[in-house]
């Protein structure tokens, strides 16, 4: 088993929480893992990406080669497109539909969605609304993680356990909101 | 067996904790920052068992670490690659004094300049200083090497350099921990005169250094990390340095590399290990993350006889970091191809956070300089460098830590008026203060605007040694107290701030405008932690 996952978004959107949750679940399953992150200057409202690789065999490169990623998880629609060169034929895109507009030349959203839909295996989720319904818009990243969860080769219960562990420090209520968000996302993916 | 999920930076930090360090010294700089942060957050750091406060700059960090080592204790200093330029004097001379307790200097290189002004390769510093270099291939090795590096350091009484690139520093993987070694006892050096580098002593010490540098290439603590593996296809031999080997192996399933491979991750190495490859293969491919250090040595000045492929002949691009695809194409392997990025995707450069005080400060600067119609606002390294981009586009330089102040002085000497420097609070105390003294000594007509956000912002909000001290530092250096002005960069103060800046531009001597407003990110974190602190107290 080997999965190469690209996690994309804008600095501050919680992509590292997504990566950390998957990472924790993979380590609990005793799998090998490499996860490259972006820190520093590029965090200030710039685009950020994490290359996450999990496997039952040792992993060499910290970076995913072009055209081999099984899954692109994006918390922002335009950012999903930025990493298309890494997507393998038949790979999945799971993305938030809500744009994060902090540049003046941000393209029309329907154009972006149209381009995402050109990829056969794509799931576009209104994660912000779902997260708000679950109790906090901040949990949008966990909606996306839930929607991507069937495609990463990790059993559901391991991901949920990791999520609980991740948020346990922040109190029972935050755990519940994020778990609900995760499950709502999962449901959407299962319907598709 | 405890397996931790650690960044390369964190693996080095955990290695240092478990190898019994007593002191950790650093100045924040991407991609090295997390080494110190991890130690500060560890039980050993929190309890004060390990001394771990931020230093004012990389030079003070290395010197303080050397002082700790003088007393027989293990110490580490960490910095980004360009930080080693700042610390170079201390680093190179510490090789001549030698150390007492083990001393490791970590330099985190940034090939492709993700967050830096150059992509210099720190391995050259190792060669220059005659200091052994470790270049780990992965997180586990980064952890393990710390133990060997400390032993090597103590055996040869030498500082040791550890070099990691961004992709290792900021990539997470499982690390198996060892049992912790107790910290070393306080023990002054048997021969303390060797730390006095007067010429007569330095000459002797340098000879010892040269001898040691020859000897240590055969030490098992270095040689065991350089491995040779033969292969059936001898049409090509490969030498891969550090993490480059991972990008190589990525291209071969089930580790079935057909070519003989020498994987190098310590320096200096003996010529003999090169012969394993050159004895078998006519043609050699050299893969290095950084400059062509090994390739250049291999070619020699005559560069004849053998086909060598690498960065110098264009097989690998001369600049930028490696990746699996670059290595694939060097081997003639067809790289994978995904979809192309649609043209509608726009670049999203970093920008000031919403509500950032720097934005209001630059709005004032832009207006204050307008009547002069000049292009001469020298700036420095920090978040405020973003003022180079629209809508401000109002700074004209960003060179090295502290250069804004001194470049402004030089430009004033050449006749620029007004000559203005914009520098962050932490950058000012890092390297701006001596420049201000130069300005005072020659009564230079410059205005230094200190963007004081009460933190080291760009690297994630570390404590700044400038906080609360700027006023007294500037007057202490000798700026006339009436020309050390403090403003609060808020929109409602705009008119007043513009007026104050212009008044100081017009003053024909050195002046300072301190623009103080807390970093919006640091403020949010502070309020959050205060809130949770309060909650905890209430629960108790």
Image (cartoon, coloured by chain):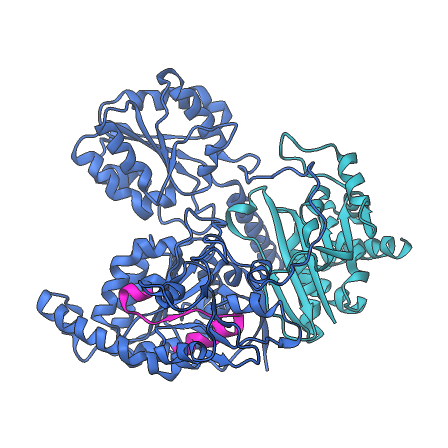
Q: Quadrant of residue A37?
A: bottom right
Image quadrant holding the N terminus of chain B, namely bottom right
Instruction: Determine whether B497 is above or below B428 in the image.
Output: above
* Residue at 22%, 73% in the rendered image: B209
Q: Which chain is cyan?
A: A
Residue B202 visible? The answer is yes
Apparent colour of chain B: blue
Residue at x 48%, y 74% (from the top left corner): B263
Of B185 and A79, the residue lying toward us = A79
Residue extending furthest toward the right? A191
Q: Nearer the viewer, residue B329 or A174?
A: B329
Could you tell me residue B227's position as x and y percent? 47, 79
- Specify the quadrant of the image occupied by residue B329: bottom right
Please give left or right for residue A77 compared with residue A64 in the image. Answer: right
Q: Which residues are magenta?
A: B126-148
Quarter of the rendering containing residue B5: bottom right
What main secondary structure does the magenta stretch of the protein show?
helix
Front-lying residue, B507 or B491: B507
Q: Is residue A134 above or below residue B416?
A: below
Pick the quarter of the image with the C terminus of chain B: bottom right
Q: Is residue B418 left or right of residue B16?
A: left
Q: In the picture shown, does residue B427 fall above or below B515?
A: below
User: Seen in the image, is B28 located left or right of residue A126?
Assistant: left
Which x, y percent locates residue A106? 67, 33
Residue B169: x and y, percent? Answer: 50, 62
- On whether residue B527 falls in the magenta region, the answer is no
């Amino acid at each position: 088993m080997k999965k190469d996952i690209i996690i994309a978004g804008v600095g501050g959107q919680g992509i590292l929480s997504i990566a950390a949750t998957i990472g924790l679940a993979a380590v609990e399953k005793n799998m090998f893992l490499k996860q490259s992150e972006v820190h520093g200057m590029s965090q200030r409202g710039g685009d950020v990406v994490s290359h996450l690789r999990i496997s039952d065999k040792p992993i060499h490169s910290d970076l995913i080669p072009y055209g081999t990623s099984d899954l692109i998880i994006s918390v922002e629609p335009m950012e999903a497109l930025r990493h298309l060169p890494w997507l393998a034929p038949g790979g999945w895109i799971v993305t938030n539909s809500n744009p994060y507009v902090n540049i003046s030349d941000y393209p029309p959203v329907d154009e972006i969605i149209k381009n995402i839909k050109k990829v056969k295996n794509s799931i576009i989720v209104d994660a912000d609304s779902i997260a708000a319904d679950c109790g906090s818009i901040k949990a949008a990243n966990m909606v996306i993680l839930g929607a991507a969860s069937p495609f990463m080769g990790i059993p559901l219960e391991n991901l949920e356990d990791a999520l609980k562990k991740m948020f346990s420090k922040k109190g029972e209520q935050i755990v519940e909101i994020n778990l609900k968000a995760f499950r709502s996302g999962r449901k959407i993916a299962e319907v598709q | 067996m405890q397996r931790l999920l650690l960044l390369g930076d964190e693996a080095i930090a955990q290695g240092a904790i478990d190898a019994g360090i007593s002191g950790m010294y650093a100045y924040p700089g991407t991609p090295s920052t997390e080494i110190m942060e991890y130690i500060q957050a560890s039980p050993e750091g929190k309890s004060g068992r390990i001394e771990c406060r931020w230093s004012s700059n990389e030079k003070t960090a290395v010197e303080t670490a050397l002082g700790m080592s003088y007393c027989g204790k293990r110490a580490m200093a960490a910095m980004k690659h360009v930080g080693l330029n700042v610390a170079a004097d201390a680093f190179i001379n510490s090789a001549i004094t030698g150390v007492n307790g083990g001393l490791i200097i970590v330099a985190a290189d940034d090939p492709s300049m993700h967050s830096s002004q150059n992509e210099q390769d720190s391995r050259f510093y190792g060669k220059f200083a005659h200091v052994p270099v470790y270049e780990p291939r992965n997180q586990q090795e980064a952890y393990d090497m710390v133990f060997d590096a400390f032993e090597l350091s103590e055996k040869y009484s030498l500082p040791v350099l550890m070099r990691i690139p961004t992709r290792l520093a900021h990539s997470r993987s499982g690390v198996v921990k060892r049992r912790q070694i107790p910290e070393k006892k306080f023990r002054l050096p048997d021969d303390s005169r060797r730390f006095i580098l007067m010429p007569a002593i330095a000459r002797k010490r340098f000879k010892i250094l040269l001898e040691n540098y020859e000897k240590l290439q055969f030490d098992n603590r270095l040689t065991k990390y350089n491995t040779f593996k033969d292969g059936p296809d001898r049409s090509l031999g490969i030498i891969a340095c550090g993490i480059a080997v991972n990008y190589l192996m990525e291209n071969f399933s089930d580790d079935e590399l057909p070519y003989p491979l020498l994987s190098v991750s310590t320096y200096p190495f003996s010529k003999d290990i090169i012969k394993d490859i050159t004895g078998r293969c006519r043609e050699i491919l050299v893969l290095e993350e950084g400059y062509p250090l090994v390739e250049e040595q291999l070619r020699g000045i005559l560069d004849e006889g053998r086909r060598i492929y690498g960065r110098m002949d264009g097989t690998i691009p001369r600049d930028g970091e490696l990746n699996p695809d670059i290595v694939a194409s060097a081997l003639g392997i067809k790289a994978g191809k995904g979809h192309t990025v649609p043209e509608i995707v726009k670049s999203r450069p970093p920008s000031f956070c919403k509500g950032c005080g720097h934005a209001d400060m630059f709005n004032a600067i832009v207006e204050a300089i307008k009547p002069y119609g000049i292009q001469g606002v020298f700036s420095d390294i920090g978040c405020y460098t973003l003022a180079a981009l629209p809508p401000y586009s109002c700074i004209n330089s960003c060179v090295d830590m502290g250069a804004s102040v001194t470049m402004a002085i030089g430009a004033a000497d050449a006749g620029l008026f007004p000559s203005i420097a914009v520098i962050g609070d932490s950058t000012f105390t890092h390297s701006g203060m001596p420049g201000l003294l130069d300005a005072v000594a020659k009564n230079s007509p410059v205005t230094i605007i200190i963007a004081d956000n009460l933190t080291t912002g760009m690297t994630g909000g570390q404590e700044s040694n400038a906080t609360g001290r700027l006023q007294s530092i500037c007057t202490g250096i000798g700026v006339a107290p009436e020309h050390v002005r403090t403003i609060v960069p808020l929109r409602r103060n705009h008119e007043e701030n513009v007026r104050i800046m212009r008044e100081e531009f017009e003053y024909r001597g050195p002046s300072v405008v301190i623009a103080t407003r807390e970093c919006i990110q640091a403020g949010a974190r502070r309020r959050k932690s205060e809130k949770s602190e309060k909650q905890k107290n209430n629960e108790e």
